[in-house]
């Protein structure tokens, strides 16, 4: 695939901070040169990046999500290899090469032209996710806007040859009108194309959901949502119990979408002063792991001014891929 860059050890060397007597994850990870090599790999989790912010800009959001993949690698590659972090459990596959898409987006003049570019990215994401899932492995997708949820859903659905369920931790529903593709309507497109069956949203904001979306959601028995307000005064245990109800709705078999707009004071395309904290997101991920999670997608992070964002993304991924003893 011309638009996918397969990584080698040399590609990530500059991220690794070497120290005598220690082994960092980036020093021990496996790399493969093609999709055909996926099935022969021991790795259960396949990590790749989508360094773009075109869907975000098409949805009038703040650019910067294209930087999340690099920020993640800067932290993830320096995780210590020890009895809790097994490098054989995962691989860094590479990234979708978004340079030509970005160049084209900077020369566009309308939101509809941006939408056409997003559709081209959709096709690439769909193909990569489908290949990973068909190989019997779990994709972990980093970076870019939430427009990429559509490709995640379509690729997984095509690989499994059935519609899938999705649980989305998000401040927004991303069920906006399907007039053109952008970061705010990936789930609506997936619904209309019958790729998405049950859809659970956790933590949406009343202030940023239009009435027409509430009207549509309230008519659909395959959609369930809870507000951030529903979690504000709960204890940690009560929050986890409430979250478990969302996983039950999606039949404990789902793609897990985490939009960083849902996290309080987290640099993202739509940063919020009110949201979940990082440790709550980590707890939700760990609870999700008790079910069958088809893929993990971390999106909308915009780390340009905050080095801690990449570290937080690294914690989310290490929690997800770690095999608890």
Image (tube, rainbow, N blue to C red):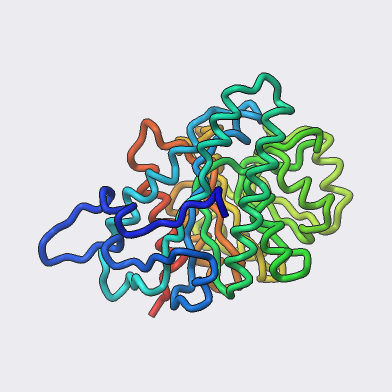
| Residue at x-position 83% and y-position 57% | 194
Residue at the far front in the pictured view: 2
Q: Where, by quadrant of the figure, is residue 305 drawn? A: top left
Q: Please indicate, yes or no, whether residue 265 appears anywhere in the rendered image.
A: no
Residue at the far right in the pictured view: 219
Quadrant of image for the C terminus: bottom left
Q: Where, by quadrant of the figure, is residue 157 drawn? A: bottom right
Q: Position of residue 223 (x, y in %)?
A: 78, 55
| Residue at x-position 30% and y-position 60% | 26
Q: Position of residue 224 (x, y in %)?
A: 75, 55
- Above or below, 180 relative to 148: above
Between residues 298 and 66, which one lies in front from this camera angle?
Answer: 66
Q: Please indicate, yes or no, whether residue 1 appears anywhere in the rendered image.
A: yes
Q: Is residue 144 left or right of residue 123?
A: left
Between residues 264 and 52, which one lies in front from this camera angle?
Answer: 52
Q: Is residue 3 left or right of residue 180?
A: left
Q: Position of residue 100 (x, y in %)?
A: 55, 36
Quadrant of image for the N terminus: bottom right
Between residues 291 and 123, which one lies in front from this camera angle?
Answer: 123
Q: Position of residue 240 (x, y in %)?
A: 55, 62
Q: Where, by quadrant of the figure, is residue 253 drawn? A: bottom right
| Residue at x-position 54% and y-position 29% | 103
Q: Is residue 230 left or right of residue 322?
A: right
């Amino acid at each position: 695939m011309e638009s996918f860059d397969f990584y080698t050890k040399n590609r990530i060397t500059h991220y690794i901070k070497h120290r005598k007597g220690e082994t960092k994850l980036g020093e021990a990870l496996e790399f493969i040169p093609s999709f055909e090599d996926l099935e022969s790999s021991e790795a259960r989790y396949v990590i790749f990046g989508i360094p773009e912010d075109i869907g975000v800009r098409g949805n009038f959001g703040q650019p910067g999500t294209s930087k999340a993949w690099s920020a993640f690698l800067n932290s993830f590659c320096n995780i210590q290899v020890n009895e809790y972090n097994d490098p054989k459990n995962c691989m860094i596959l590479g990234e979708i090469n978004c340079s030509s898409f970005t160049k084209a987006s900077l020369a566009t003049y309308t939101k509809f032209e941006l939408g056409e570019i997003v559709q081209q990215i959709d096709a690439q994401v769909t193909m990569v996710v489908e290949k990973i899932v068909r190989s019997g492995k779990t994709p972990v997708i980093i970076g870019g806007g939430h427009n990429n949820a559509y490709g995640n859903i379509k690729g997984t659905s095509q690989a499994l040859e059935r519609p899938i369920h999705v649980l989305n931790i998000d401040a927004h529903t991303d069920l906006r009108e399907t007039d053109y593709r952008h970061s705010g309507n990936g789930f609506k497109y997936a619904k209309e194309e019958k790729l998405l069956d049950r859809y659970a949203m956790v933590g949406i904001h009343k202030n940023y959901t239009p009435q027409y979306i509430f009207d549509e959601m309230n008519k659909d028995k395959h959609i369930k949502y809870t507000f951030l307000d529903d979690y504000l005064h709960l204890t940690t245990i009560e929050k986890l119990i409430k979250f478990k109800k969302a996983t039950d709705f999606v039949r404990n078999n789902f793609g897990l979408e985490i939009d960083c707009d849902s996290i309080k004071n987290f640099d993202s395309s739509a940063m919020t002063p009110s949201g979940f904290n990082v440790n709550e997101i980590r707890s939700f991920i760990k609870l999700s792991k008790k079910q069958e999670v088809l893929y993990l997608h971390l999106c909308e992070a915009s780390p340009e001014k905050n080095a801690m964002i990449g570290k937080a993304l690294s914690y989310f991924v290490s929690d997800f891929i770690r095999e608890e003893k």
